[in-house]
Amino acid sequence: MTLDEALEALRERVQAGRAEGMAKYHKIPREYLGIANPDLNDLTKDWRSTLDVDTRVRLAGELWQTDIYEARLAAAKLLTQARIKPDDAAWELIKSWTPDFDSWAIADHACMAGQKRLVADPTRLDEIEPWTTSDHMWTRRAALVITLPWTKQNNPKPAEIEARERILGWLASYASDHKWFIQKGIAWWLRELSKHDAARVRSFLAEHGETLKPFARKEAARQLPPEAA
């Protein structure tokens, strides 16, 4: 499949009048086609099932470079799959996108693809850690979003606990960064962890909660179960 063929398939799914609302909502100046997410999901699911890995990586890179909103989402969705073998090229491509992050929707879709590659090879956390000190706010935030799988284990193995604690150390280093998206990212990570390890979230908030913005502290604790009397 060529880039032109992929863009033609995207444009066939445009809904009249939708692009204007999307541009107003996302507020980032770029081309918006006006495609509903279910339609984008169906299209990229078909591409994943019919294109080999090399073609998908190549096409994802080309779609991303167009800077069209739905094309960037499609690029990420092309690589959002648990099993990709080999996956080194896909991982390198996903990492290369981080300097371009400028909105939560595109960044989160790319990070969802990245989550699968991190779970497939947790040693890649070493490559994420430098993101935490980036001058680029969206890259710093991406270190939180891409590591969300470590909030979801009910019975983590020792290596998973070690990784979780490592990431919680990143959250602690972010606590005094009061940019809204950073604080929202911290709250998201802690809220998800609270569903599986409430005690650890309470411990984190006891140590760092006063450094967080009040809204982030409240959001992080929103799903904590009541403490036993």
Image (tube, helix red, strand yellow):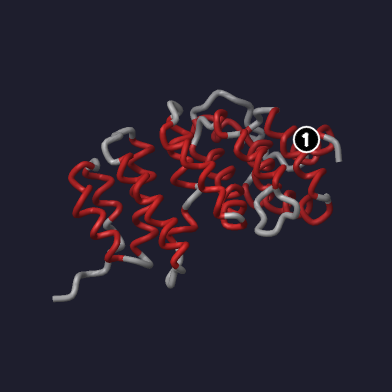
Q: Name the residue under label 1.
A: 7
Q: Residue at x 81, y 34 (%)?
A: 3
- On the image, the x and y values in percent for residue 152 come to 45, 63
Q: Which residue is more in the foreground, 44 or 117?
A: 117
Q: Is residue 67 left or right of residue 124?
A: right
- The residue at 49%/28% (across/down) is 27
Q: What residue type is labelled 1?
A: Leu
Using the image, determine if residue 30 lies above or below residue 204: above
Residue 71 in percent (x, y) is at 68, 36
Query: In this view of the protein, which residue sits in the foreground, 26 or 203?
Result: 203
* Count of picture labels: 1
Q: In the rendered image of this protein, does residue 171 appear above or below residue 190?
A: above
For residue 174, above or below residue 118: above
Quadrant for residue 193, please give it.
Answer: bottom left
Q: In which quarter of the image is the N terminus?
A: top right
Quarter occupied by residue 226: bottom left
Label 1 Cα neighbours within 10 Å, binned few <14 / some 14-19 / many ≥20: some
Question: Residue at 21% of width from left, 44% of height from top?
Answer: 214
Provide residue 133's location: percent of width, then percent of height: 41, 33
The quadrant of the image that shows the C terminus is: bottom left
At 29% across and 62% down in the image, what residue appears?
A: 200
Q: Position of residue 163 (x, y in %)?
A: 44, 56
- As helix, strand or loop, the secondary structure at mark 1 comes to helix
Furthest residue in direction bottom, as rendered: 229
